[in-house]
Amino acid sequence: MDLLEYQVKEWFGKIGIPVLPSQRIDHPTDLKRLKIGFPIVLKSQVHGAERAKAGGVRFAETTIDAIAAAQNIFSLPIWGELPEVVLAESQYDANQEFYLAVVLDTAVCRPVLLGCKEADIDWESAGEKMHHVVVEQEFSPFYARRLALKMGLQGTLMQSVSSVLQKMYQLFVQKDLDLVEINPLAVNPNGEVMALNGKVRVNERAIKRHPDLGEMAAKIISRHPSTEINGILGDWDGVQMHGKIGILGNGTGSVMATLDLVANAGGKPGVCLNLRHAFLTDTTPTTFSDRLETGLKILAADKSIEVILINFLGNIPQAEEVAQIIAKFVQEDNNELKLKIVRSNGSKIPRDLNIPSLVVRLAGSELNATKNYLATLKTQSSALIVVENLDEAVEVAVRLAKPSTKKK
């Protein structure tokens, strides 16, 4: 999970890394109450790279110019993402710019300090220009000074850069991060350093250990229920694709098998969620029923999903509650969640394929009561197909997701 720049700058400021005076802008009119002095720079807060080239970074000398620039930025998608926030920041006079990073090297399972006397450089392809120091033992200021010396820095500047590196490493460890990056670290004519832009990548497996990270991840999911799932829910707890059939399972094997069968049958799998384990965004203990309810909401909010396919195998905890959650979900008289209920005893599949359908496959003697309960549901507002055979469930789901063809 990558943070946006304004979030990164908040972390930098709290830990003591020099950052410019700035203000979060949620609407262009917020610039009328700007607390920092002009001239300013306005930056689009998106995850996509090269935002400056795309027009997402603009300079302004007056309030009128700033409002006009902000209006353009808010309406400018970068790599398909529209900003919800714009960062207003003071301008800075720099005569040198460096690249600094602390990154987790998975090959040696150790943190690595990176530094380069050129900014806007890709550390993965920088070659000899990029200097590095592997933190082989407990961290000490020695590692930071060693990198600064490798970069050819001396005197006060070497001390300033070393200090920034130490605080970057401190943040890296405190928040269980995969990457802390400053690009660029600017130096003004007086030799003062300033982090003009930063990047932080959170280790997904660490989200549970930090309530503030869990809240951030939860907000991302609530705003972008499908586009941000991959990389937030973790390895096979959540997999994001852009197909029409969302999948809920109670184990890695069942989810993978269902996904493969859907693809082999000519269907297009969408978001797949494994409910056996807690989501990485859960900061408090959750039950299987809690995760089922959350999973259904995530898939229902995804406009690309036309069919929700549930495949539960063996046994599940709280089987009675699971039946109640599914029943409540399909009976909701909500325009967004209109599902047609269809019995599995030979009823016709609904012809109106523009609304999502729910296909449930339950296999196992402990699930018989749940299956029988769902099979007796009778309402006119939604569609539920209950089957025992996985191949049949996949066939029905793929058929429902295919576009209808009309004879001319």
Image (tube, grey):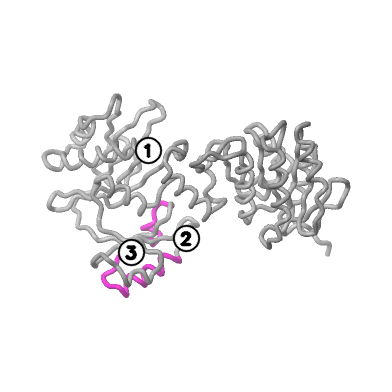
Q: Is residue 354 left or right of residue 196?
A: right
Label 2: element kind: loop
Residue at the spot 71% in from the left edge and 59% down from the top edge: 338
In the picture of the structure, the residue carrying the numbered disc 1 is 124
Residue at the spot 45% in from the left edge and 64% down from the top edge: 76
Of the residues tagged 3 and 1, which is closer to the observer? 3
**Percent from the top left, x then y, of residue 95?**
18, 53
Q: Would residue 231 be visible to someone looking at this image?
A: no
Q: Label 2 amino acid?
A: Leu
Q: Around disc 3, counting alpha carbons within 10 Å, would you say few (fewer than 14), some (14 to 19), or many (20 or more)?
A: some
**Percent from the top left, x then y, of residue 86?**
38, 61
Q: Which mark is residue 82?
A: 2
Pointer 3 and pointer 1: residues touching (CB < 8 Å)?
no
Examine the image and state in which quarter residue 351 appears.
bottom right
Pointer 2 and pointer 1: residues touching (CB < 8 Å)?
no
Which tag, 2 or 3, sits closer to the chain's start? 3
Examine the image and state in which quarter residue 43 appears.
bottom left
Residue at the spot 48% in from the left edge and 52% down from the top edge: 219
Residue 52 part of the magenta segment: yes
